[in-house]
Image (tube, rainbow, N blue to C red):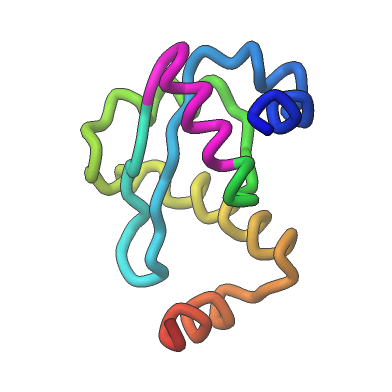
C-alpha cells in the first residue's frame, strides 16, 4: 500500500529536501510543529498529504522558519505572511476563520 501512496505524491514534492509544519490553534500565534531536511522533510510532506493538510510551497519562507526551534511561535514580522497563507487554507476548506475557532471549540 505504501508504494501506491507514493505514486500519488507530486513529483516536485518528492524532490523537496526541506520542510516545516506549523501548528495553529486559532488563539495564539502559529508555532513550529515540525522541521526537517532530506528524509525527514519527505516524512513531514507524506504525513501532511495523508492527513490532507494543505501544502504551501515557499522555499525562502521554509528556510527562514527552519531556523526556529520546535515549539517557537512565528516571529511578529511574519504574522501578515502567515495570515495570508492561513486565509488561503481557510478558503480552500470553504471556511471562515471564525468557523475554525467554533469547530475547535466543539472538539
Is residue 37 located in the magenta-colored stretch of the structure?
A: yes
Q: Residue at x 62, y 60 (%)?
A: 87
* Total numbered circles: 0
Give the x, y percent position of residue 68: 26, 31
Q: Residue at x 56, y 42 (%)?
A: 48
Q: Quadrant of residue 45?
A: top right
Q: Residue at x 52, y 55 (%)?
A: 83
Give the x, y percent position of residue 99: 58, 81
Q: Quadrant of the C terminus?
A: bottom left
Give the x, y percent position of residue 49: 63, 41
Q: Nearer the viewer, residue 72 or 13?
A: 13
Residue 77, placed above or below residue 42: below
Give the x, y percent position of residue 103: 52, 82
Residue 30, placed above or below residue 94: above
Provide the major secondary structure of the magenta segment: helix
Q: Nearer the viewer, residue 29 or 44?
A: 44
Which stretch appears magenta?
36-48
Q: Quadrant of residue 67?
A: top left
Residue 89, placed above or below residue 9: below
Q: Quadrant of the N terminus?
A: top right
Residue found at the far front of this picture = 1
Image side of residue 6 versus residue 81, left or right: right
Q: Nearer the viewer, residue 61 or 34?
A: 34
Amino acid at each position: 500500500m505504501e508504494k501506491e501512496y507514493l505514486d500519488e505524491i507530486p513529483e516536485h514534492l518528492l524532490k523537496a529536501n526541506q520542510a516545516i509544519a506549523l501548528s495553529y490553534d486559532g488563539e495564539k500565534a502559529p508555532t513550529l510543529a515540525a522541521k526537517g531536511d532530506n528524509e525527514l522533510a519527505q516524512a513531514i510532506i507524506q504525513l501532511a498529504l495523508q492527513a490532507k493538510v494543505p501544502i504551501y510551497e515557499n522555499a525562502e519562507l521554509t528556510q527562514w522558519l527552519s531556523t526556529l526551534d520546535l515549539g517557537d511561535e512565528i516571529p511578529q514580522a511574519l504574522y501578515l505572511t502567515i495570515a495570508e497563507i492561513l486565509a488561503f487554507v481557510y478558503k480552500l476548506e470553504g471556511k471562515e476563520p471564525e468557523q475554525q475557532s467554533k469547530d475547535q471549540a466543539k472538539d
